[in-house]
Amino acid sequence: MSAIVHWNTVYLGRAVDHLRRQGRIIRAEVLKHVSPLSWEHINLTGTYAWGEKPSLIDGFRPLRLPQPFARAA
């Protein structure tokens, strides 16, 4: 569990850094409600398929950035 929390913390930090570089203001009041304790996105006991080699940047997979939202008129 400690490894998962550490890994999630690193990726959350990278996501916040990315958003800040994009000009988003991320306040500490908001970040204190973000937790690295979830692991639903990690397959702990399932089947693992090792196909193509992942594309890593400095040892990390790229952040999964959402597509832009379509605005309703």
Image (cartoon, rainbow, N blue to C red):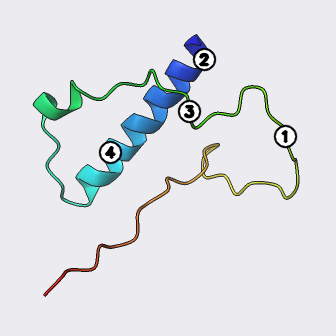
Alpha-carbon distance for marks 4 and 1?
30 Å
Tell me: 30 left or right of 8. Answer: left
Give how far apart the Cα atoms at labels 3 and 1 are.
16 Å
Query: Tag 1: Cα neighbours inside 10 Å, few (<14), some, or many (≥20)?
Result: few
* Lower position in the chain sequence, tag 2 or tag 1: 2
- Residue 28 at what x, y percent from top left? 14, 30
- Quadrant in which residue 41 is drawn: top right
Dot 1 corresponds to which residue? Answer: 48
| Residue drawn 42% across the image and 25% down it | 36
Of pointers 2 and 3, the one earlier in the residue sequence: 2
Residue furthest bottom as drawn: 73
Mark nearest the camera among 4 and 2 is 2
Residue that mark 2 sits on: 3
Residue 27 percent across, percent down from the top left = 12, 37
Mark 4–mark 2 Cα distance, whole angstroms, equals: 21 Å
What amino acid type should be assigned to the residue bearing mark 4?
Asp
Number of residues whose C-alpha sits closer than 10 Å to that of mark 4, classed few (under 14), some (14–19) or many (20 or more): some
Front in this rendered view, residue 15 or 45: 45
Query: Which residue lies under the disc numbered 3?
Result: 40
Left or right placement of residue 34 versus residue 50 in this view: left
- Amino acid type, mark 1: Tyr
Location of mark 4 (residue) = 17
Quadrant for the N terminus in the image: top right
